[in-house]
Amino acid sequence: MSLRACVIFGGAGCIGTHIARHLLEHAEVERIYLADIRPPRDEDHVKPLLRWMESRDGALPRVVYVPCDVRLPLDAAPLPQQADLIVNLAAVHREPGHAPNEYYQTNLPGAEHVCAYATRAGCSRVVFTSSISPYGSSDAARNEDSLPAPETAYGSSKLAAEKIHIAWQRAHPDRRLIVLRPGVVFGPGEHANVARLVRSLARGYFVYMGNRSTRKAGIYVKELCHVVLFALEHQDKTAEPMLLWNVSMDPPPTLEEFVNAICASTEYRPPRWSLPRNLLVAASYPVAGIAQLFGIHAAVNPVRMRKLSQSTYIEPLRLRQAGYRFHYTLQQAMMDWKQDAPEDFGVRGRRVLEASDEVSMKS
């Protein structure tokens, strides 16, 4: 695949920086624009991108950071006038953490403004990362043929954003769209759901609450990068104008499998105890209340506690039918993550995570 200009909205975040690296290393890309409200963080997995952002011998760098806010029209943003590929990752996604209206005020105008920019830039290919949240929670397996039933403002806003992208694609016969619905994304730079699980196991305070067999659709961030490139190549071969794919390990791992994979990759002891769910949820209310009273950010939250016992059994049916072969098992993903970012699994890593809890990946 050869691209002159690729624009990644939300490109300075965890997923965006990994996708940018993957495209630079595995595709012919002349220049990548990371369009985001903030520049990339100075983290280990981002350092190669930071080097590519440096100008050499007077030539333009291969990676360019573009400050922009997708909630606003992008006419004045210093984006390229032409683009061959747009990847739209920009969204408000942390749950809990935002008022319901904030998801709609960002995710819907963001979709509209990115699609409007794609039209102005003559870009006929867009990849949009949605979420598995439009399915809601369920112990029964769901796939791309299942009827969406979002239970949260986030899930509803992502489903609506999908429709905006689909309308853009259908407006012109030459346009191609890929909508990916990833489960919880984990790996270097994540600082969210699975990172919290790593931290709780490292500290020894994680306990089950009757949820060992709860399935959690999830995908290693590097695997997601492989899926993006695979989907683009698959679309080239099939000439399908629109793809809608779930992205998760197949089958989605159980919570116990996540825990065992983390423990097998470290010296952490597997948890032995299991406490009643209702007891832990009830205990989380005063903890969260006291933390809010004193302005302290607490990882213990009733919403998060409930989510731990809710299955997201989402199958990647279309990915399976397309013949995709996974590059990482769950344990291999944890080992690779630890190798790339050992601080995420050590004492210093725990401090970094504590300072970064305000950042959360999709789930």
Image: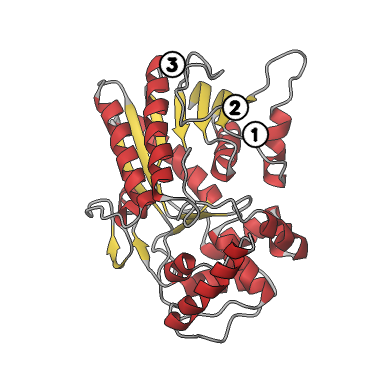
* Residue extending farthest front: 293
Disc 3 packing (10 Å; few <14; some 14–19; many ≥20): some
Horizontal side of 130 relative to 267 (left or right) equals left
Horizontal side of 360 relative to 204 (left or right) equals left
* Rendered image: mark on residue 363: none
> Depth-wise, is mark 2 or mark 3 nearer the camera?
2
Residue 107, image x and y in percent? 40, 39
Question: Which image quarter is the C terminus in?
Answer: bottom left
Q: Amino acid at mark 3?
A: Ala
Residue that appears at 42% across and 81% down: 278
Pointer 1 or 3: first along the chain: 1
Disc 1 packing (10 Å; few <14; some 14–19; many ≥20): some
Which residue was labeled with disc 1?
39
Task: Give SS at disc 1.
Answer: loop
* Depth order, front residue of 2/12: 12
Question: In the rendered structure, are the residues bearing label 2 and label 3 in contact, judged by CB atoms less than 8 Å apart?
Answer: no
Q: Amino acid at mark 1?
A: Pro
> Depth-wise, is mark 1 or mark 3 nearer the camera?
1
Horizontal side of 92 relative to 147 (left or right) equals right
Disc 2 packing (10 Å; few <14; some 14–19; many ≥20): some
Pointer 1 or 2: first along the chain: 1
Question: In the rendered structure, are the residues bearing label 1 and label 2 in contact, judged by CB atoms less than 8 Å apart?
Answer: yes
* Rendered image: mark on residue 121: 3
Asked if residue 356 can be seen in this view, the reply is: yes
Q: Amino acid at mark 2?
A: Pro
* Depth order, front residue of 123/362: 362
Which residue was labeled with disc 2?
67
**207 lies above or below 137:** below
> Alpha-carbon distance for marks 2 and 3?
17 Å
**222 lies above or below 67:** below
> Alpha-carbon distance for marks 1 and 2?
7 Å
Residue 354, image x and y in percent? 68, 60
